[in-house]
Image (cartoon, rainbow, N blue to C red):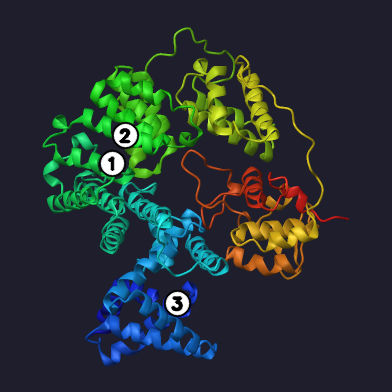
């Protein structure tokens, strides 16, 4: 066999067998990170030996044997072999199970460990795809459109957390099983949804993630056959996946459910979904959230045409789902079903009740649903604005183009009755007016960034094409309350001041009339105590960017905005300093920062030192000086850096509020 063919075989075997191998190793070494390292050693051995010796008859068994041998050697070197053998023998006697069942249960244990609630959701997803899907960090990064180092850090941090928390390699029982199982199901469905409706990128779907989620779901259903919710999730995914071929047109554009060619739906997947649904019902008990969602999918699959869909039954099922899972997204889906079953006005009444919900402020499907309902009511001007808002909110290029086409197909509409279009320099529409306001020469870069954050939220909340005369205090108050209603007084007052400045410049009435100024408590400016700093440096969760920024602020004692304004080309890593505006060494640091900076730079030679996690969307183009020419990402804002520091330090702050970045400045 040619070497490329051998490598393809090894890759296929690894994706099929890696979960079993790693799970078996975790039983021996009791450490997920070490188990994966030993499994990778076996993979390297295969890459070295199989091109010469040929692929073994049972390649999975060969990899497992090599990995276990190395695990035993490792345990022996650590002097723990006899203790582990006694422990394994005891476990085997307790379980009384045959070896094939042990393999299956080991994989199930690994799934519960990788989805453990002690890990943040993003880390659970990355670790599950790594350990149980056999995906590399690069493959996971491509699937979720995030940098590979970010994924690698998530996986490494997850392994470290599991080791530090001493999470046991065991199957939960009793009441703990339901809680832990819900965490596993959540991860599997998150993976499926990201594949089924990609949140970013150019394509509507990422089929590889859908297939991986289906594989994990089927594996879980085989391992816990008496859990109705597991079968419900599998049924839901099978039926949704059956529509994949019909969901996009020839150019990759989205095709709405009622316009899909149902002859292209995969009947095999539909039958599998029906079978899984029957198994869920056989398990008995009241239906849970996944079983109810699967029942909704069954209603769609059973309808021979879109017109024959039983929307009244679907609305009833969504009402039952809302009682179990009263989330804003479920309520929005119910609004769609009610609008189909009982008319668009009934659906719009429900959707309008969600516009002030902070959880949906960046959810593009809310204005998309409202746009559809408004269009059906003949209110085309308002519908057009909603489709534009939805297009601005989505990060998926295919969906954005689809929403823009829907907006383009509708007439512009007339301004709101009684609205006054202001005289003066302001253009007629909100988006253009905001851009003109921020393009003024008398605003410095920091002010533009601060005002821009407030006014971008206003544009997203109201729509760029909203006539300026229709922007009133009530609408502005609704947008700001949803975005920053629970913010600290200083943050709230800053956004309020930005609205007042914009209104005064544009010649509008006081748009901040519905925004009361909040009293600001005396700020805490004292430095963080040395013992608290040690706890901060030891936190396992913060990213490399945050750890570097915090160290640099502490060691340099420089102002926060000055540090965030640093560019890579300003740095002198050898002398541990950065040039200021006049060529002087404006910011200097010590060994802690010096150890972190090279890894943070990752070869970059130009652009801002501290960057955002992802590239800016089409409606958020920063100034050239604030954009990295090598990665396309923007400079990290003061507001974002402050927010992340507060979140990270709340558990350390006795007051429970979190600290400010200024408190990193050392005591004198």
Which of discs 1 and 3 lies nearer the camera? The answer is 1
Q: Secondary structure at mark 2?
A: helix
Circles 1 and 2: CB atoms closer than 8 Å:
yes
Circles 1 and 3: CB atoms closer than 8 Å:
no
Which of discs 3 and 2 lies nearer the camera? The answer is 2
Q: Secondary structure at mark 3?
A: helix
Percent position of residue 646, x then y: 66, 47
Q: Which mark is residue 292?
A: 1
Nearer to us in this view, 73 or 464: 73
Which quadrant of the structure image shows residue 326? top left
**In the picture, which quadrant includes the N terminus?**
bottom left
Percent position of residue 261, x then y: 14, 40
Percent position of residue 648, x then y: 63, 52
Looking at the image, which residue is at 28% across and 24% down? Answer: 339
Residue wearing tag 3: 35
Of labels 1 and 3, earlier in sequence is: 3
Residue 379 vs 8, above or below: the answer is above
Q: Which mark is residue 484?
A: none
Residue 570 vs 401, above or below: the answer is below
What distance separates the C-alpha of mark 1 from that of mark 3? Answer: 38 Å
Residue 75 vs 558, above or below: the answer is below
**In the picture, which quadrant includes the C terminus?**
bottom right
Looking at the image, which residue is at 13% across and 53% down? Answer: 268
Q: Residues within 10 Å of mark 1 (few under 14, many from 20)?
A: many
Residue 10 appears in the figure:
yes
Looking at the image, which residue is at 27% across and 59% down? Answer: 221
Of labels 3 and 2, earlier in sequence is: 3
Of labels 1 and 2, earlier in sequence is: 1
Q: Residues within 10 Å of mark 2 (few under 14, many from 20)?
A: some
Residue wearing tag 2: 320
Q: Which residue of the protein is positioned furthest toward the right in this rendering? A: 668
What distance separates the C-alpha of mark 3 from that of mark 2? Answer: 44 Å
């Amino acid at each position: 066999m040619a070497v490329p063919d051998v490598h393809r075989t090894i890759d296929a075997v690894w994706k099929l067998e890696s979960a079993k191998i790693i799970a078996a190793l975790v039983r021996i070494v009791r450490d997920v990170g070490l188990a994966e390292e030993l499994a990778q050693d076996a993979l390297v051995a295969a890459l070295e030996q199989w091109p010469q010796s040929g692929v073994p008859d049972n390649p999975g068994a060969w990899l497992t044997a090599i990995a276990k041998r190395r695990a035993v050697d490792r345990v022996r070197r650590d002097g723990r072999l006899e203790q582990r053998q006694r422990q394994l023998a005891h476990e085997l006697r307790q379980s009384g199970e045959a070896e094939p069942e042990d393999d299956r249960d080991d994989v199930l244990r690994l799934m519960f460990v990788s989805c453990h609630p002690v890990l943040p959701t993003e880390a659970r997803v990355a670790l599950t795809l790594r350990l149980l899907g056999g995906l590399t960090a690069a493959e996971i990064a491509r699937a979720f459109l995030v940098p590979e180092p970010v994924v690698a850090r998530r996986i490494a941090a997850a392994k470290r957390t599991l080791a530090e928390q001493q999470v046991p390699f065991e199957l939960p029982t009793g009441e703990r099983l339901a809680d832990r199982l819900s965490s596993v199901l959540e991860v599997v469905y998150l993976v499926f949804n990201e594949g089924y409706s990609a949140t970013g990128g150019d394509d509507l779907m990422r089929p590889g993630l859908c297939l991986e989620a289906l594989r994990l779901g089927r594996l879980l259903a085989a391992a816990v056959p008496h859990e109705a919710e597991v079968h419900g999730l599998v049924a839901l995914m099978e039926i949704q996946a059956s529509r994949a071929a019909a969901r996009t047109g020839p150019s990759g554009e989205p095709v709405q459910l009622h316009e899909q060619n149902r002859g292209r739906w995969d009947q095999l997947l539909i039958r599998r979904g029906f079978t899984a649904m029957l198994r869920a019902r056989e398990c008995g008990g009241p239906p849970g959230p996944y079983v109810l969602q699967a029942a909704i999918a069954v209603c769609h699959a059973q309808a021979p045409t879109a017109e024959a869909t039983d929307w009244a039954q679907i609305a009833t099922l969504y009402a039952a789902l809302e009682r179990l899972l009263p989330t804003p997204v479920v309520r929005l889906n119910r609004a769609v079903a009610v609008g189909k079953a009982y008319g668009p006005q009934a659906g719009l009444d429900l959707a309008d009740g969600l516009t002030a919900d902070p959880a949906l402020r960046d959810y593009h499907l809310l204005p998309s649903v409202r746009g559809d309902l408004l269009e059906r009511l003949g209110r085309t001007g308002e519908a057009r604005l909603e489709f534009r808002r939805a297009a601005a909110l989505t990060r998926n290029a295919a969906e954005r183009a689809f929403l823009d086409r829907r907006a383009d197909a509708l007439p512009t509409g007339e301004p709101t009755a009684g609205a006054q279009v202001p005289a003066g320099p302001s253009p007629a529409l909100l988006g253009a007016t905001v851009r003109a306001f921020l393009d003024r020469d008398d605003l410095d870069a920091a002010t533009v960034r601060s005002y821009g954050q407030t006014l971008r939220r206003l544009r997203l909340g109201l729509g760029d094409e909203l006539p300026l005369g229709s922007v009133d205090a009530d609408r502005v108050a609704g947008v700001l309350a949803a975005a920053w209603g629970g913010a600290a007084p200083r943050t709230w007052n800053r956004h309020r001041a930005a609205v007042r400045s914009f209104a005064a410049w544009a010649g509008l009435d006081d748009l901040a009339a519905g925004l009361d100024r909040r009293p600001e408590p005396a700020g805490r400016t004292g430095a963080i105590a040395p013992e608290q700093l040690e706890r901060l440096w030891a936190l396992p969760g913060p990213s490399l960017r945050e750890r570097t920024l915090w160290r640099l602020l502490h060691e340099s004692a420089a102002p926060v905005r000055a540090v965030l304004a640093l560019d890579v080309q300003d740095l002198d890593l050898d002398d541990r300093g950065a040039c200021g505006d006049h060529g002087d060494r404006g910011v200097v640091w010590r060994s802690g920062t010096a150890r972190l900076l090279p890894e943070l730079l990752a070869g970059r030679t130009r652009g801002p030192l501290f960057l955002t996690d992802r590239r800016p969307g089409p409606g958020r183009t920063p100034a050239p000086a604030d954009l990295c020419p090598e990665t396309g990402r923007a400079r990290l804002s003061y507001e974002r850096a402050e927010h992340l520091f507060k979140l990270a330090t709340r558990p350390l702050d006795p007051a429970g509020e979190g600290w400010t970045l200024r408190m990193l400045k050392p005591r004198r």
